Image: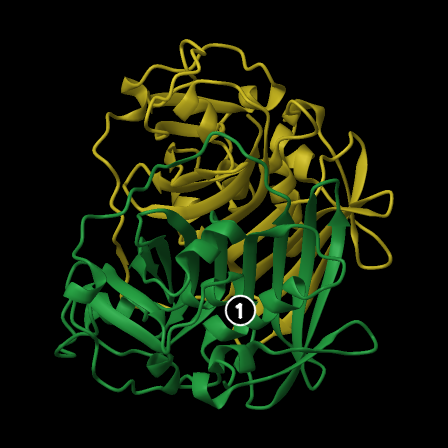
Chain colours: A yellow, B green
Amino acid sequence: MSRHAFDDAIALTAQSDGSWLGHTSPVYANMVGPFGGVTAAQAMNAVLQHPQRLGEPVALTVNFAAALADGPFTVQARPARTNRSTQHWVIEVLQQGQTVLTGTAFTALRRDTWSADEHTMPVVPRPLDVPLLERAGRVEWINRYEMRFMEGDFPAAWDGRDHGISRTRLWVRDNPPRPLDFASLTALSDVFFPRIWRRRASPVPIGTVSMTVYFHADAARLRDVGTGYLLGQAQAQAFHRGYFDQTAQLWNEAGELLVTTHQIVYYKE
Amino acid sequence: MSRHAFDDAIALTAQSDGSWLGHTSPVYANMVGPFGGVTAAQAMNAVLQHPQRLGEPVALTVNFAAALADGPFTVQARPARTNRSTQHWVIEVLQQGQTVLTGTAFTALRRDTWSADEHTMPVVPRPLDVPLLERAGRVEWINRYEMRFMEGDFPAAWDGRDHGISRTRLWVRDNPPRPLDFASLTALSDVFFPRIWRRRASPVPIGTVSMTVYFHADAARLRDVGTGYLLGQAQAQAFHRGYFDQTAQLWNEAGELLVTTHQIVYYKE
C-alpha cells in the first residue's frame, strides 16, 4: 500500500546539525508556492519528530515571511525552554539561507481537569447529507480535501458586491481519507479560502501572514476521530487597510471542539 | 511633569550588541512576576524602537516561557526577513541567560483599501454611565487601569459553580489616562482576568502561555483615540485538560475595531 500524499508532503529528514530537510510537494501546490497549511504542518512536524520533545502540541504560530520556491527547504526547531511539564519551541524555515517562515510552538503534558466546550457546534446537517464540492480546484491542493459546504461556498458569481458577511461552514477531511493527527489537523486549520473572497465575491490577491492554532484535542481524541469529518467554521472580524483577520473553529462529528485558530491575511484591492 | 508609569515600565536601553535592557516594574506587579500585558508591551517596544523597523505593527505573538523574576531582563529583536513593505521579527526575552519569553512580530507599511468591521461593537451604555470598579486590586497592576464592567465583573461570590458563560464586557483605559499607542494597546490586549475565574467563579491557579494580537488600527487611528476609553470583550471557546483559550476584541468609543486578540491559558483545577 502506498503512503498517503500528505505523509510524503510533510516528510522530513534529520540533518547532522540538528535541522530537518524537507521538500515542497507539487500535489499541494497553491497559486504561488505551496498550500500554507502544509507548510505549517511541516514546521509542526519538525517539533513532533524532535527527539527532545516533551508532551503534545497545545499552541502553534507560524508566520509566512515569503512564498516558498518549489524545491528543498530546511526546518530548524529549537526547544528554547523546557519546564517540568511544558516546552517552548522556536521554529524557522529557510531556503537558500533566507528565512521563509518564522514560528513558535508550545507542547505540554496534559492532565485531567474540569473541561467544557463553550463555543458549541452549530446545528448542521450530517456530512453525507451535504453535497460534495465536485468542481476541480483551480489550484492543486484543493483536490486533496473532501469539502462539503453548508454556507459560504466559493461565490457562484464573482460579482464584486459586498455580501456583508464572510462566514463559511463546511464538513471537511483529507481526500483520500487519512486518520487525523496533529500534523494533518494543523493543515486543516488553514483549509478555508480567503474571507475577503467570500465577503466581496472578488478574487483579489491575498496571502496569509500569520496563523495561530490552539489544539484543544489531545492525541487520544484525535485517534477517536480517525478518518471522520471535521466541521469547519471561519469568519473575519475586521478588514482594514490591507489586512483582514480570520477566526475559525474545527469540531469533530461528535461536536467536540478540536481546534480554535486565527489568521491575519494580506489583501490587495 | 513626571512620566507616566507605563512609559517607565516599558523603557528599554539599547545595548552595544544590539539587544535591549529592561527592568520589571513593581507598579505593574501580578501575583507571580509582572502583569503579562506589560511584558508583551516590552517585547513589542524592542521592535518599535529598533532602528531597522519598517512600518507599523500588524501582528504580535508572545509566549510566556517562565515567570519573570523581579529585576533586569534582556530583549533580543531580530528582523528575520525584510520585504519591500513588510517585515518579520523574531523576539526573545532572557533573564540570567535563560529564555523567559519567545515571540514573533510582523510590521508593514499599510495602504488604503476597501475596509470594514465585520464584528461590530455590541450596544452598550456610554463609559461614564457605567460604574467605576472601586475595589483596590488584589494585585498591583489592576490599579493601573480604569475598569468599568458591564458584564462579567470579578465574581461577587467565589461559589465554584459553573456559570455556563465566560464573557466579560468592560470600558477600560490607562489609569491615569495616557494617549493610546501600540505599546499600551498591546498591554490592554491582556487586561482581561482569566476566563475560568469568570465561568467557574473559582480563583484557580492560571498562567497565560501564548498571546496573539492583531492590530487593525494604524497609528493615525490610535492618535485619534487619545485618552478615550476602549470597549473590551473577552470569551473562552474551550476549556480542555489544563488549557483554555480566550478570544477578545477592543473597540474605540466610535465603534471602530482596533484589535482582535487571542490567548491560550494554563489552568489547574
Q: Is residue B85 above or below residue B51?
A: above
Give the left or right position of residue B52, taking residue A233 as reference.
Answer: right
Looking at the picture, tell me which residue is in the foreground, B216 or A170. B216
Q: Which image quarter holds the C terminus of chain A?
A: top right
Looking at the picture, tell me which residue is in the foreground, B191 or B239. B191
Looking at the picture, tell me which residue is in the foreground, B225 or B36. B225
Q: Which image quarter holds the N terminus of chain A?
A: top right
* Res. A187 image quadrant: top right
Give the left or right position of residue B134, taking residue B27 as reference.
Answer: left
Residue located at (36% from left, 77% from top): B175
Q: Is residue B69 above or below residue B209?
A: below
Q: Residue most toward the front? A: B1
Residue located at (75% from left, 42% from top): B83
Q: x, y percentage for residue B132? A: 20, 74
Residue located at (48% from left, 85% from top): B33
Q: Is residue A216 visible?
A: yes
Residue located at (50% from left, 62% from top): B181
Badge 1: few (under 14), some or many (20 or more) residues near its Cα, within 10 Å? many
Q: Which residue is mark 1?
A: B40
Give the left or right position of residue A240, taking residue B84 as reference.
Answer: left
Q: Is residue A52 visible?
A: no
Q: x, y percentage for residue B46? A: 66, 68
Q: x, y percentage for residue B84? A: 75, 40
Under tag 1, what secondary structure? helix
The amino acid beneath tag 1 is Ala
* Res. B111 image quadrant: top right
Give the left or right position of residue A8, taking residue B189 as reference.
Answer: right
**Labels in figure, total:** 1
Question: Subunit of mark 1?
Answer: B
Looking at the picture, tell me which residue is in the foreground, A147 or A268. A268
Q: x, y percentage for residue A214? A: 45, 53
